[in-house]
């Protein structure tokens, strides 16, 4: 049966797994059994996708990223070069903790910057931006920009990837005209059209 996705000859794909139409898997990567990769994804060089990882459609993973069991990426997530995921909160080489893996959820459209670290058990909100080198130790709300170690919210990001600035709990993107509101709890939502 002819495949409707591309795998470079230097990469390994363990069966069974699911790989969507139009996905490209580049040099020296390893897709492990029982993983699910959506359509039109781009898996860069030297990437490992561990068992039971789920990637939505349009996910882009740059070089040197290991996506460990417990990670779920929704559609159109960007994982920058050499970003790091964990899946156990208290690892020891001599203690097996596979039954303690914690889920990490990266919601639709979020971007994870180069060399950032995402500690397991946290959620990155939709369209959030994690800056290069940041260390995420807690949940990140939708549309937030997080930088530093430990990561802290320093601003907000539009769906289109441009910075938005709130005045009186309202923001309008100067690039695409999307509008946002911030409720009394500081939660950002796209304004109803």
Image: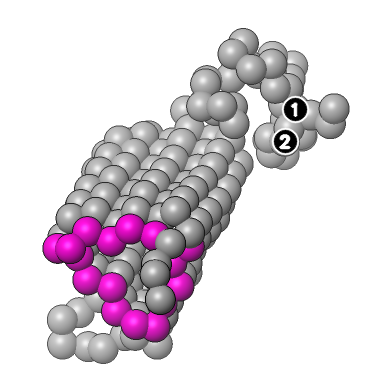
Residue 30 against residue 78 in the figure, above or below: below
| Residue at x 84% of width, y 31% of height | 192
User: Would you call the spot at circle 2 few (<14 residues within 10 Å), some (14-19), or many (20 or more)?
Assistant: some
The answer to whether the residues at label 2 and label 1 have Cβ atoms under 8 Å apart is yes
Real-space Cα distance between discs 2 and 1? 6 Å
Q: Is residue 193 left or right of residue 90?
A: right
Question: Of all residues shown, which one is farthest toward the front?
Answer: 1
Q: Quadrant of residue 51?
A: bottom left
Residue nearest the observer in this picture, 4 or 41: 4
Q: Is residue 10 left or right of residue 101?
A: left
Residue nearest the observer in this picture, 191 or 146: 191
* Residue designated by label 2: 189
Q: Is residue 17 magenta?
A: yes
Residue 148 against residue 163 in the figure, above or below: below
| Residue at x 59% of width, y 13% of height | 175
In percent of width and height, residue 120 lies at: 40, 64
| Residue at x 20% of width, y 79% of height | 92
Magenta segment boundaries in residue numbering: 5-20
Q: Is residue 24 left or right of residue 71?
A: left
Label 2 element class: strand
Residue 49 against residue 58 in the figure, above or below: below
Q: How is the image coloured?
A: one colour
* Residue designated by label 1: 181
In percent of width and height, residue 137 lies at: 40, 53
Q: Let me know if residue 156 appears in the view.
A: no
- How many numbered callouts? 2
In percent of width and height, residue 106 lies at: 50, 54
């Amino acid at each position: 049966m002819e495949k409707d996705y591309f795998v470079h000859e230097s990469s390994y794909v363990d069966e069974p797994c699911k790989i969507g139409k139009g996905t490209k898997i580049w040099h020296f990567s390893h897709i492990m059994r029982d993983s699910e990769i959506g359509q039109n994804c781009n898996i860069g060089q030297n990437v490992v996708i561990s068992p039971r990882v789920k990637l939505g459609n349009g996910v882009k993973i740059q070089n040197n990223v290991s996506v460990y069991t417990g990670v779920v990426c929704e559609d159109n997530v960007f994982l920058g070069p050499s970003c790091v995921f964990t899946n156990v909160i208290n690892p020891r080489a001599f203690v097996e903790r596979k039954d303690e893996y914690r889920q990490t959820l990266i919601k639709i459209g979020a971007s994870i910057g180069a060399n950032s670290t995402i500690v397991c058990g946290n959620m990155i909100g939709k369209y959030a931006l994690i800056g290069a080198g940041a260390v995420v130790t807690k949940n990140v709300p939708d549309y937030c920009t997080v930088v530093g170690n430990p990561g802290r919210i320093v601003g907000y990001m539009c769906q289109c990837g441009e910075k938005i600035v709130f005045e009186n709990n309202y923001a309008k993107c100067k690039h695409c005209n999307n509008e946002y509101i911030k409720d009394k709890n500081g939660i950002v939502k796209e304004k109803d059209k």
